[in-house]
Image (spheres, grey):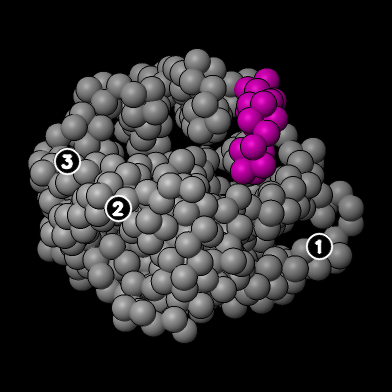
Amino acid sequence: ANINATPVATQLNFNLPVPPERAVLDSSQLISAGQYDIAIATLSAERAALGDTYNPYPAYFEAVALANQGDYQDAQTLLVTLEAGLAQFSEVEANLYRPIVELAFGEVIVIQARAAMTENRVQEAGNLARTAILRLQDAVNLNPRLLNAYLLLAEAQTLLGDYQAGIRALQDAQLLPELANDPAIIVARGQVFLADGRSLKTRGLTENAYAQLERAEYEAYYALYLNPFLEAAHQVRIEAALLRDQPGLAVQYSQNYLLYFEDNLDGLRLLAQARLQENNPDLAYAVLDQALGSISADAGTVSTVQDTTLIDLLVERAGLYSSERRYGLALADYNQALLLAPTPGLQAQRMTAAYAAGDFDTALTDATTLLGSGALPDAYFTLMQARIRLDRARSGDLEANREALALLTTVSDALLSPALAAVANEYRARAHLTLGEVDAALTTIDAALLGGDSGSRRYLRGQIYQEQSNFVSAARDYEWVLTWAAVYGYAFADDVRERLAEVRQAQLETALTPTAIP
C-alpha cells in the first residue's frame, strides 16, 4: 500500500458548496473500498438519470473510480465533458461548480502521477504532478474550504520532492478555523515529513532524516490522539519508526494498529517488516503467512484494495525468501503477484529472482520484455541477457562468448549499482579469457574485485594468472578460495584443488629448470 498518498477526495472529508446525493455518497465508499466496477456502474446510472440537470458529482467520482482502475483516458474524457457543461451558466453560477470540476481534474491527475512514480516513470510523474497543482490551486482559489484540494496539493508537491511546498499547502489549510485541527491535515503533514525523512536517509543525511521522521511520528501520534481509528496515521508512525531503525518501537506500534484493526493486512505487513528488522525472520514468516492465509480464505470477496495489499505481502515475503536464498519460493510469490499486477517494476524483481532460482527462460524473457520499459536502466536488462548467454554457453563456445561480450560492451557501468557493475566486469573477464584475450581478462577481473571480493572472482583470476604462467599469483588466489571453501562450500573447490596442484608442480619445475649463463 502507498502510505505516502494523502487521503483521496472520495472519503468526502471536505466542505462542499452543495452536497452530493445519497447514491454518490454510497459509491464513494465503494471507491474507498476498492470496489471500482460496482461504483462505476452506479455512478454511470446516476449520470444517465440526470437528464439535462447539471450535477458534477456522479461524473467526478466515476472519473476517480476509472482512474484508480488505470482508465485515465476515459476519466479525462468524462471530466472534459463535465467542464464543457459549465458554459451554460453565468460566471457566478459556474463558479459554484467550477471548484469541484478543478478538484476532480486534480485528483484524477494525481492518481495517474502516483501510478507513474510507483512504476519509476519519474519524469512523467513530475509532469503530471505539475499539471495537477495548477488545477488544484485553481480549486483552492475559487473555494478555500475544499480540504481535499489541500491534501492533494501536498501529495503532488511530495511527488515532485518539494516537501516544504507540501507542508506550506497544509499550513494554508490550517489557517481556516474549520480546518485548523482536522485530523486529515495532521496525518497529511506526517506523510510529507515521512517522505522527506525517507529521501534524506536515502541520500545519507541520517541526522536530518531522523529529525523529519520524528516530526512525522509526532504528527501521527497527535492524529491518533484525536482519533485512534485513522489507519494512515498508524501506518505513518510505524514507517517512521522503521526508518529511524527502531524495530522494537515499530512492533509496538504495529500491535497497537492491529488492536484497533484486527487482522488488518497492512498492519500485518508492517509488523512483518518490523519483525524482520528485529532479525526475527521466523516471526516475520509467521505474520506474512497469517496475512496471506486470511486473504486466501476470503478469496471470493477480495477487492482491488485487497489485491494491492496482497501484492505488497507477496513481494514482502518474496524479499524475505530471497534474503535467505530460497529463490524458488521467492519466484513463486513474484509469479502470483504478477498475475494480479503485471507491472514492469514487479517483472524486474521477478527477473532477478528467476535468475537466482536457475529459471533462465523466465529471466531472459523478462529481461528482453523490459528493455525500454523504464523500470530500471536498460543496462540492467542487457547485463542479464549477457549473463544468461554465458551461463548457458558450453565450454569453449567462442560464438556465445563473442555475443555476450558484445552485449556487455553496450552496458554502461555508471548506470548499474556498484555490485552489478562488478558483476558485469566479472562476466567480461570470463568472456575475454575464453576468447584468449588474457590481458583484457585480467584488467576486467581486477576491476570486478575492486567492487567486491568473492570466491568466483578469485577462482577466475587464478585461472587468468595460470594462463599467463604467473604461478605465484595464481597459487595465492587458489589458496584464498580453498580457505573460504570450508565456510561457503564452493562448487568449484575440487577444480581449484586440481589447479593448485598443477600450479605448484609448474612452480617446482620452473625452480628446477637451469638458468642459462650468458
Q: Nearer the viewer, residue 250 or 99?
A: 250
For marks 1 and 2, the one nearer the N-term is: 1
Percent of width and height locating residue 65: 51, 64
Q: Going 34% across and 57% down the picture, which residue do you hit?
A: 466
Magenta range is: 156-176
Identify the secondary structure beneath mark 2.
loop
Badge 2: how crowded within 10 Å, few (<14), some, or many (20+)?
A: few
Badge 1: how crowded within 10 Å, few (<14), some, or many (20+)?
A: some
Q: CA distance from mark 1 to mark 3?
A: 79 Å
Identify the secondary structure beneath mark 1.
helix
Q: Nearer the viewer, residue 257 or 143?
A: 257
Amino acid type indicated by mark 1 = Leu
Observer-side mark, 1 or 3, equals 3
User: Are dots 1 and 2 in contact, CB under 8 Å?
Assistant: no
Helix, strand or loop for the magenta stretch, by majority: helix
Residue 158 located within the stretch drawn in magenta: yes
Q: Going 18% across and 42% down the picture, which residue do you hit?
A: 484
Query: In the rendered image, is residue 388 in sight?
Result: yes
Kindly identify which residue carries mark 1: 86
Amino acid type indicated by mark 2 = Thr
Q: Nearer the viewer, residue 229 or 450?
A: 450
Amino acid type indicated by mark 3 = Thr
In the image as oriented, which residue stretches furthest toward the front? 518
Observer-side mark, 3 or 2, equals 2
For marks 1 and 3, the one nearer the N-term is: 1
Kindly identify which residue carries mark 2: 513
Q: Would residue 292 appear left or right of 416 to someone viewing this image?
A: left
Kindly identify which residue carries mark 3: 483
Q: CA distance from mark 1 to mark 2?
A: 99 Å
Badge 3: how crowded within 10 Å, few (<14), some, or many (20+)?
A: few
